[in-house]
Amino acid sequence: MNDRTDQARSSARPTDAEDALPPTEQHARQYKAVRDAHETELIEDYVELIGDLLDHGGEARATDIAARMGVRQATVARMIRRLNELGFVNNEPYRSIFLTDRGREMANRSRERHAVVLRFLRSLGVDDATARIDAEGMEHHVSEETLDIMQRFSENNSDSR
Protein backbone atom coordinates (compact mmCIF):
# COMPACT_ATOMS: atom_id res chain seq x y z
CA MET A 1 0.00 0.00 0.00
CA ASN A 2 1.06 3.55 -0.50
CA ASP A 3 1.32 6.37 2.01
CA ARG A 4 -1.95 7.97 0.86
CA THR A 5 -3.91 4.78 1.46
CA ASP A 6 -2.33 4.37 4.89
CA GLN A 7 -3.15 8.02 5.77
CA ALA A 8 -6.75 7.68 4.58
CA ARG A 9 -7.27 4.53 6.63
CA SER A 10 -5.68 5.94 9.75
CA SER A 11 -7.71 9.16 9.56
CA ALA A 12 -10.94 7.17 9.14
CA ARG A 13 -10.23 5.01 12.20
CA PRO A 14 -11.49 6.16 15.57
CA THR A 15 -8.85 7.32 18.00
CA ASP A 16 -8.03 5.26 21.07
CA ALA A 17 -10.13 7.67 23.15
CA GLU A 18 -13.16 7.14 20.90
CA ASP A 19 -12.71 3.36 21.07
CA ALA A 20 -12.38 3.25 24.85
CA LEU A 21 -15.22 1.86 26.89
CA PRO A 22 -17.23 4.56 28.63
CA PRO A 23 -17.16 4.70 32.43
CA THR A 24 -19.10 1.81 33.99
CA GLU A 25 -22.00 3.92 35.28
CA GLN A 26 -22.46 5.64 31.91
CA HIS A 27 -22.30 2.30 30.10
CA ALA A 28 -24.95 0.85 32.42
CA ARG A 29 -27.20 3.90 31.80
CA GLN A 30 -26.83 3.41 28.04
CA TYR A 31 -27.94 -0.22 28.22
CA LYS A 32 -30.77 0.58 30.64
CA ALA A 33 -32.07 3.27 28.28
CA VAL A 34 -32.16 0.76 25.43
CA ARG A 35 -33.92 -1.86 27.57
CA ASP A 36 -36.50 0.72 28.69
CA ALA A 37 -37.11 1.81 25.09
CA HIS A 38 -37.57 -1.81 23.96
CA GLU A 39 -40.06 -2.38 26.75
CA THR A 40 -42.39 0.39 25.58
CA GLU A 41 -41.85 0.53 21.81
CA LEU A 42 -44.33 -2.17 20.82
CA ILE A 43 -47.00 -0.66 23.05
CA GLU A 44 -46.33 2.77 21.55
CA ASP A 45 -46.46 1.37 18.01
CA TYR A 46 -49.85 -0.24 18.61
CA VAL A 47 -51.30 2.82 20.35
CA GLU A 48 -49.99 5.14 17.61
CA LEU A 49 -51.45 2.91 14.88
CA ILE A 50 -54.81 2.72 16.63
CA GLY A 51 -54.83 6.52 16.87
CA ASP A 52 -53.95 6.84 13.19
CA LEU A 53 -56.68 4.40 12.16
CA LEU A 54 -59.23 6.26 14.28
CA ASP A 55 -58.14 9.65 12.91
CA HIS A 56 -58.01 8.60 9.27
CA GLY A 57 -60.75 6.00 9.00
CA GLY A 58 -62.99 6.55 11.99
CA GLU A 59 -62.41 3.11 13.44
CA ALA A 60 -59.65 0.76 14.50
CA ARG A 61 -60.42 -2.92 13.97
CA ALA A 62 -58.19 -5.83 14.92
CA THR A 63 -58.13 -7.03 11.31
CA ASP A 64 -56.82 -3.65 10.13
CA ILE A 65 -54.20 -3.55 12.88
CA ALA A 66 -53.04 -7.08 12.02
CA ALA A 67 -52.75 -6.23 8.33
CA ARG A 68 -50.81 -3.02 8.95
CA MET A 69 -48.52 -4.55 11.59
CA GLY A 70 -47.94 -7.69 9.51
CA VAL A 71 -48.99 -9.99 12.34
CA ARG A 72 -51.76 -12.50 12.98
CA GLN A 73 -55.06 -11.45 14.51
CA ALA A 74 -54.33 -13.62 17.56
CA THR A 75 -51.21 -11.52 18.19
CA VAL A 76 -53.29 -8.35 17.98
CA ALA A 77 -55.91 -9.79 20.33
CA ARG A 78 -53.25 -10.49 22.97
CA MET A 79 -51.84 -6.98 22.63
CA ILE A 80 -55.29 -5.38 22.81
CA ARG A 81 -55.95 -7.25 26.06
CA ARG A 82 -52.65 -5.96 27.41
CA LEU A 83 -53.37 -2.39 26.26
CA ASN A 84 -56.79 -2.62 27.89
CA GLU A 85 -55.22 -3.80 31.17
CA LEU A 86 -52.72 -0.92 31.00
CA GLY A 87 -55.52 1.58 30.48
CA PHE A 88 -54.61 2.67 26.93
CA VAL A 89 -57.65 1.30 25.07
CA ASN A 90 -61.29 0.35 25.50
CA ASN A 91 -62.83 -2.37 23.42
CA GLU A 92 -65.66 -4.85 23.25
CA PRO A 93 -65.67 -8.15 21.37
CA TYR A 94 -66.38 -7.72 17.64
CA ARG A 95 -66.32 -3.93 17.95
CA SER A 96 -63.82 -1.19 17.14
CA ILE A 97 -60.98 -0.37 19.50
CA PHE A 98 -60.91 3.09 21.07
CA LEU A 99 -58.14 4.98 22.85
CA THR A 100 -58.59 6.20 26.38
CA ASP A 101 -57.38 9.70 27.22
CA ARG A 102 -54.14 8.12 28.40
CA GLY A 103 -53.86 6.17 25.14
CA ARG A 104 -54.55 9.30 23.07
CA GLU A 105 -51.77 11.15 24.92
CA MET A 106 -49.32 8.32 24.19
CA ALA A 107 -50.39 8.14 20.55
CA ASN A 108 -49.90 11.89 20.10
CA ARG A 109 -46.49 11.85 21.79
CA SER A 110 -45.37 8.89 19.72
CA ARG A 111 -46.63 10.46 16.49
CA GLU A 112 -44.78 13.71 17.27
CA ARG A 113 -41.52 11.86 17.97
CA HIS A 114 -41.94 9.88 14.76
CA ALA A 115 -42.54 13.06 12.75
CA VAL A 116 -39.42 14.76 14.14
CA VAL A 117 -37.19 11.78 13.33
CA LEU A 118 -38.75 11.41 9.86
CA ARG A 119 -38.24 15.11 9.02
CA PHE A 120 -34.67 14.91 10.31
CA LEU A 121 -33.80 11.91 8.14
CA ARG A 122 -35.39 13.54 5.10
CA SER A 123 -33.43 16.75 5.77
CA LEU A 124 -30.25 14.64 5.67
CA GLY A 125 -31.26 13.48 2.20
CA VAL A 126 -32.42 9.98 3.13
CA ASP A 127 -34.98 8.77 0.58
CA ASP A 128 -38.57 8.61 1.79
CA ALA A 129 -38.96 4.83 1.90
CA THR A 130 -35.75 4.36 3.90
CA ALA A 131 -36.51 7.32 6.16
CA ARG A 132 -39.91 5.85 7.02
CA ILE A 133 -38.41 2.47 7.92
CA ASP A 134 -35.57 3.98 9.96
CA ALA A 135 -37.82 6.47 11.76
CA GLU A 136 -40.08 3.63 12.90
CA GLY A 137 -37.34 2.22 15.10
CA MET A 138 -35.38 5.32 15.96
CA GLU A 139 -38.30 7.26 17.43
CA HIS A 140 -38.27 5.01 20.50
CA HIS A 141 -34.56 5.25 21.15
CA VAL A 142 -33.71 8.94 21.09
CA SER A 143 -33.67 11.26 24.06
CA GLU A 144 -35.60 14.50 24.31
CA GLU A 145 -32.28 16.34 23.91
CA THR A 146 -31.56 14.51 20.66
CA LEU A 147 -35.12 15.08 19.42
CA ASP A 148 -34.78 18.82 20.09
CA ILE A 149 -31.52 18.93 18.12
CA MET A 150 -33.06 16.91 15.29
CA GLN A 151 -36.00 19.31 15.22
CA ARG A 152 -33.76 22.40 15.07
CA PHE A 153 -31.55 20.82 12.41
CA SER A 154 -34.59 19.98 10.27
CA GLU A 155 -36.00 23.47 10.60
CA ASN A 156 -32.66 25.05 9.67
CA ASN A 157 -31.95 22.67 6.79
CA SER A 158 -35.32 22.15 5.20
CA ASP A 159 -35.69 22.80 1.54
CA SER A 160 -38.44 21.82 -0.83
CA ARG A 161 -37.91 18.05 -0.35
Image (cartoon, rainbow, N blue to C red):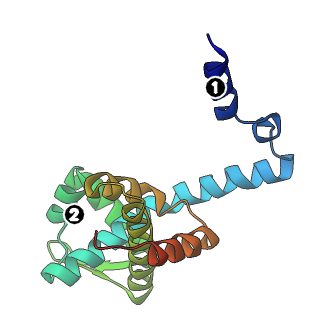
Q: Amino acid at mark 2?
A: Ile
Q: Mark 2 or 1 closer to N-term? A: 1
| Residue 42: percent from left, percent from top | 42, 59
Secondary structure found at label 2: helix
Q: Quadrant of residue 118?
A: bottom left
Query: Label 1 crowding class (10 Å Cα cut-off): few <14, some 14-19, many 20+?
Result: few
Instruction: Residue at 22%, 50% (x, y): give it.
Output: 70
Quadrant including the N terminus: top right
Q: Residue furthest top?
A: 1
- Look at the numbered discs 2 and 1 and tell me whether their residues touch, using CB distance below 8 Å: no
Q: Quadrant of residue 158?
A: bottom left
Residue on which disc 2 sits? 65
Q: Front-most of 134 and 16?
A: 16
Instruction: Residue at 32%, 58% (x, y): give it.
Output: 132
The disc label shown at residue 53, or none: none
| Residue 93: percent from left, percent from top | 19, 72
Task: Give left or right: position of 60 versus 152.
Answer: left
Q: Amino acid at mark 1?
A: Arg
Q: Is residue 13 above or below residue 115?
A: above
Q: Front-most of 19 and 112?
A: 19
Q: Is residue 82 something one can see in this rendering?
A: no
Instruction: Residue at 15%, 84% (x, y): give it.
Output: 58
Q: Front-most of 31 and 117?
A: 117
Query: Label 2 crowding class (10 Å Cα cut-off): few <14, some 14-19, many 20+?
Result: some
Residue on which disc 1 sits? 9
Work out how far the residue at label 2 is from the one at label 1, CA to CA, in angstroms.
Answer: 48 Å
Instruction: Residue at 63%, 22% (x, y): give it.
Output: 4
